[in-house]
Image (cartoon, grey):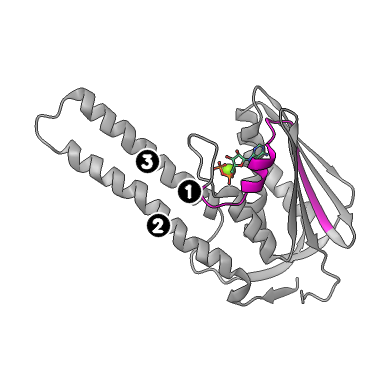
Amino acid sequence: MKKQLYHNEKLKSLSEMAASISHEVRNPLTVTRGFIQLLKSPGIDDEKKNSYLDLSLQELDRAESIISDYLTFAKPHENIEFELLNVTDEVNYVVNVMQPYALMRNVSIKKEFFIKESYILGHKRQLHQCLINLSKNAIEAIQDGGKLEFKVKKENEKATIQLTDNGVGMTSEQIARLGVPFFTNKEKGTGLGTMVAFSIVKAMKGEIKVNSKMNEGTTFTILIPEDKGTGTVS
Ligand code: ADP
Ligand code: MG
């Protein structure tokens, strides 16, 4: 399979993100360290002890969520290598990965492929991360069971992946704030998922469109230029 090595500037925004994300991970770690220190103080009562432990666990969960929204699949020091990817294979992979999370939240995942193959140049694990972040949001937006649907098609020489949920939907203000780092409407949110997804798609010279209606649901459409068989993206 043809592979293409890409230089760092293509993913500069991702590495800039890494700097702010390590800063965000450090905060919960510092807070947790403080609680553990407090737990060592003599004569501490059970009530205080339990509250310090609960807060520590909460903060560690937070650090874990930040890392998983940003880096589920990345390996440290991995070369930024773009390769030819068939989007239908990658969507199939992500649907399998998301199945347990969907099941846990009573969401059924459907997929509809209008084409068998459509090739793009991208980074496999980053494309997975992007689709996982968006489908995680879709599943989290669904209350009391619902449906997440993946569609893969071709539109104007672009590989098109569409994710539709019948979740809570978003106001136009919420849509406008998508991708803003650390902006979240969730109690335990990181506000990183969409920012990471947007910047991964941008690195592949693609774009994301959002359509949403309150109490009806949301559609994210990812459009990525198809590889025309040259193995290069200009
Ligand atoms: P987080 O999920 O940690 O809050 P994200 O960047 O992944 O951070 O998402 C930011 C916000 O965008 C979410 O808190 C949510 O309010 C909104 N959002 C994203 N995707 C959807 C969706 N499919 N349906 C409804 N709201 C969404
Ligand atoms: Mg999210």
Left or right for 204, reference 21: right
In the rendered structure, which amino acid carries the disc numbered 2?
A: His
Label 3 sits on what residue type? Glu
Q: Give the position of the C terminus as an image quadrant.
A: bottom right
Task: Give the spatial CA distance, label 1 vs label 3.
Answer: 11 Å
For discs 3 and 2, the disc positioned in front in the rendered view: 2
Q: Is mark 3 within 8 Å of ligand 1?
A: no
- Cα separation, mark 2 vs mark 1, equals 11 Å
Q: How many marks?
A: 3
Q: Residue furthest left?
A: 42
Front position in the image: 79 or 217: 217
Magenta region: which residues? 159-182
- Which residue is found at the position 53% from the left and 52% from the top? 181
Residue bearing mark 3: 59
Instruction: Between label 2 and label 1, give the one nearer the viewer.
Output: 2
Residue at 82 percent of width and 58 percent of height: 159
Q: Is residue 190 left or right of residue 116?
A: left
Specify the quarter for ligand 1.
top right
Residue 3 drawn at (x, y percent): 71, 73
Residue 113 in the image, given as x and y percentages of width and height: 86, 46
Residue 68: in sight, yes or no?
A: yes
- The residue sitting at 89% across, 52% down in the picture is 115
> Can residue 135 be seen?
no
The residue that disc 2 covers is 23
- The residue under label 1 is 66
Which mark is on residue 157? none
| Residue 111 is one of the magenta-drawn residues | no
